[in-house]
Each structure stands twice: as C-alpha cells, then as structure tokens.
Image (cartoon, helix red, strand yellow):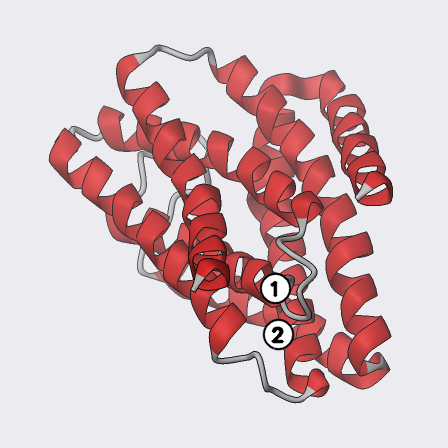
Amino acid sequence: MNEWLTAAGAGLLAGGALFVGALIAWFVNVPARVVASIMAFGAGVLISALAFDLVGEAMAESGLVPTVSGFAVGAIVYVGVNILLDARDARNRRGSAEGPGTGTGIAVGALLDGVPESMVLGLSMLGGQGVSIPILTAVIISNLPEGLSSTAELKAAGRKPRFVFLLWGGIALAAAISSLLGFTILADAPVELTGFITSLAAGAMLAMICDTMIPDAFRKAHNYTGLLATLGFLVSFVIHQLA
C-alpha cells in the first residue's frame, strides 16, 4: 500500500507543478523572459532525462525494436494530435503572436506529455528501485513554466479562476492516476511492452520540447537559450550519475 501511495504521490507531485505554475501566474506578474529562461533550462533537463533514463533504460530492458518503435510512435502521436488541434484552431503555440488557445487545446497538450511521463514514474518503481529522481526532477522543472505560460494566456483570454484551477487540478489528478497505473497494471507486463511505453514517453517528450519549449524559450530568452538548455542538461546528467 505504501508503494501505491508513493507512485500516486510522485505523479501528483509532477502534475502538481502545473498547478503551482498556474497559481504563480494568476497571482504574480512573472516577466516573460523569466518564464522563458526556466523553460529553456527545463528543456535541457528533459533531453538529458529522456536520453539517459528513458531511452537508455528501455534499450537495456527490452532491446532495439521496442525502443525504436515506441520512440517513433510517441513522437508521431504527439505531432499528429497537435496537427489536428491546429486544423481546428484549438491550440495556440505558446509564445506566438496568435491569440490565446482554448482551454481544451492547452489541456490536451499538457496531457499528451504529462500522462506518459507520469506512467514512466510508476514504471521506474518496479523492482523496488523507488521513484526515478532524475525523471521526477525533469518533469517538475518542465511542468512549472508550462503552467506559468499557459495560465497567463488563459487569464488574458478572460477565463475565470474556477475554470483554470479545475483544469490544472484535473490534469494533476490524471498524472497521479497514470503513475499509479504504471506501477500496478504494468507490474507484470512483458519487458517489451514496458520498454515500448517508456520509449513512447521519451518520443512524445522530445517532440514536445522541439515543438513548444525551445521555440518559445528562444523567442523570449534569445541568445541565452542554448546556454540555459546546456546547463539544464548538465544538472540532470549529474543527478542521474549521483542517483
């Protein structure tokens, strides 16, 4: 039971970073350059985590085919859903000159990378290893600026606080459930399936980084984006080695 609570708590903590970012954005006027700098740092953290923790682990456990296929499927699904949302004008790329996106588009975008990320947190606990600290750190650091920037757009669009906080609270709850499912339902799954899911999360994360985080950070942080991303990568790498 304690392990169940730990798995759910890890997912809630990761998804809760979105809610914390929303709270900050709603009550504090955070400069866009600060948000972009955090996002650039978070992008580097995520790239390191997906390379060393997700893809590396999937390859070691399940082999080449599940790892490559899962990675490709994750990226294709993420990009495909975003193309559909763009076609319906339901998603606004954060930091663009377009008007704020709808709540549905923003929520879907957060769920697309949040659910597999949280499921991987649960998977990382299998075998009694405990929650992967590098992955949890990476997800929290990347979710905080996402909650900040997205909530700022929702607020500018005239959304009510009840809608905004129910939106992010629901996503945080979904993250907790996903982490719990990763730990319980997939506990006895074949290594090929768990490796596929782990790699799928990595593919979706990389597509999200390239599609939203880095472009948005560059538009606002400009020349410092590469340096901040490199710093984030190194911090995550050191955490990985120490863990």
Q: Residue at x 34, y 21 (%)?
A: 25
Question: Mark 2 — residue?
Answer: 197
**Vertical side of 126 occupied by 101: above or below:** above
- In the rendered image, the quadrant that contains the C terminus is top right
Q: Amino acid at mark 2?
A: Ile
Query: Foreground residue, 222 or 71?
Result: 71
Query: Foreground residue, 32 or 232?
Result: 232
Q: Residue at x 24, y 26 (%)?
A: 155
Q: Is residue 8 left or right of residue 120?
A: left
**Vertical side of 97 occupied by 47: above or below:** below
Secondary structure under tag 2 reads helix
**Vertical side of 186 occupied by 57: above or below:** above
Numbered label attached to residue 108: none
Q: CA distance from mark 1 to mark 2?
A: 6 Å
Question: Mark 1 — residue?
Answer: 201
Q: Evaluate whether residue 176 shows in this view.
A: yes
